[in-house]
Image (cartoon, grey):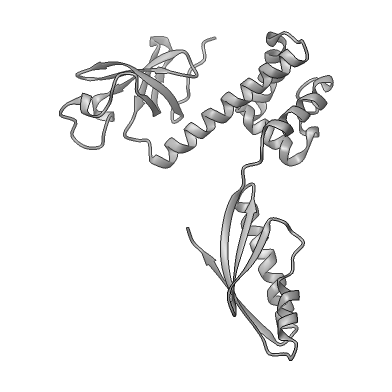
């Protein structure tokens, strides 16, 4: 069965034909062509389509309609935000890197690539949709995430290769806090209150009584939880030592 993109999916392609009524795009991942009607080129009026697109141009498009029986894929350029474009390109690069890793794994262990595809690539894509998501899960939670998904004899070597190839991409959130203490040893109390053993939490003095808090984490949900836990710890400690603290979340 031929593989087609799903409606609503963002895809990367190359413009191979330009017509007065739209452009033809060769999709990188599906070995198929899609069409962007002129009305989906730009949100504004398109007088001359060639002022908006060029032959050979690499684009990110949104899949609007798929009709496999007609081998038809309708795409949109104007419905792709800058953020979605960046995310899709990053995802594409990570997936390409993941496939290269499996090719190297096959060569390194003298295993036919078709066997790697059947026993590793396909099972992981069925479970995670994208290879890099499977590799990221292993980086975050250990090699046991592969148990029951791929043959045990591949797990150790594959995990070691993933760890030496990929890094966990972290997000960052920031906050500032104003902290005061009215006890005689107030400076020491504040130092103790701000202390943390978490290497992903960075505290810097901005100028008394203000400090900056920077937290890094694999995702925003975890980062926000870390910030909440840290702020509660500092607030409780200062409350118990005749002090006060005010946290202010810094928005991007």
Please tell me which residue is depicted at 72% across the width and 75% down the height of the picture: 191
x and y, in percent, of residue 112 in the image: 72, 8
Q: Nearer the viewer, residue 47 or 202?
A: 202
From what the image shows, is residue 134 above or below residue 234?
A: above
Q: Quadrant of residue 108?
A: top right
Q: Quadrant of residue 156?
A: top right
Taking the view exactly as shown, the residue that stands out farthest to the right is 153
**Which quarter of the figure is the N terminus placed in?**
top right
x and y, in percent, of residue 236 in the image: 72, 76
The number of numbered badges drawn on the structure is 0
Please tell me which residue is depicted at 59% across the width and 80% down the height of the picture: 209
x and y, in percent, of residue 162 in the image: 72, 30
Q: Is residue 223 visible?
A: yes
Q: Quadrant of residue 215?
A: bottom right
x and y, in percent, of residue 142 in the image: 78, 37
Q: Is residue 119 visible?
A: no
Please tell me which residue is depicted at 72% across the width and 37% down the height of the picture: 139
Task: Locate residue 26 relative to residue 168 in the image: left or right.
Answer: left
Q: Nearer the viewer, residue 24 or 57?
A: 57
Please tell me which residue is depicted at 48% across the width and 33% down the height of the picture: 88
Q: Nearer the viewer, residue 249 or 56?
A: 56
């Amino acid at each position: 069965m031929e593989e087609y993109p799903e409606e609503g999916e963002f895809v990367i392609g190359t413009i191979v034909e330009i017509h007065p009524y739209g452009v033809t795009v060769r999709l990188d991942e599906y070995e198929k062509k899609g069409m962007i009607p002129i009305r989906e080129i730009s949100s504004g009026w398109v007088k001359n389509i060639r002022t908006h697109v060029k032959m050979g141009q690499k684009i990110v498009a949104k899949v609007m309609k798929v009709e496999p029986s007609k081998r038809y894929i309708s795409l949109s350029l104007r419905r792709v935000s800058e953020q979605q474009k960046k995310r899709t390109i990053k995802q594409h690069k990570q997936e390409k890197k993941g496939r290269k890793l499996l090719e190297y794994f096959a060569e390194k262990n003298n295993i036919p690539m078709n066997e790697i595809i059947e026993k590793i690539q396909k099972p992981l894509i069925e479970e995670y949709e994208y290879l890099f998501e499977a590799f990221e899960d292993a980086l975050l939670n250990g090699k046991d995430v592969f148990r029951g998904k791929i043959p045990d004899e591949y797990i150790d070597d594959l995990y070691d290769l993933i760890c030496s190839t990929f890094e966990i991409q972290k997000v960052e959130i920031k906050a500032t806090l104003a902290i005061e203490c009215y006890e005689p040893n107030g400076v020491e109390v504040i130092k103790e209150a701000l202390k943390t053993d978490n290497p992903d939490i960075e505290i810097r003095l901005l100028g008394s009584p203000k400090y900056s808090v920077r937290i890094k984490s694999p995702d925003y949900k975890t980062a926000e939880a870390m910030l909440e836990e840290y702020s509660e710890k500092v607030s409780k400690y200062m409350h118990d030592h005749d002090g006060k603290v005010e946290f202010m979340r810094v928005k991007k």
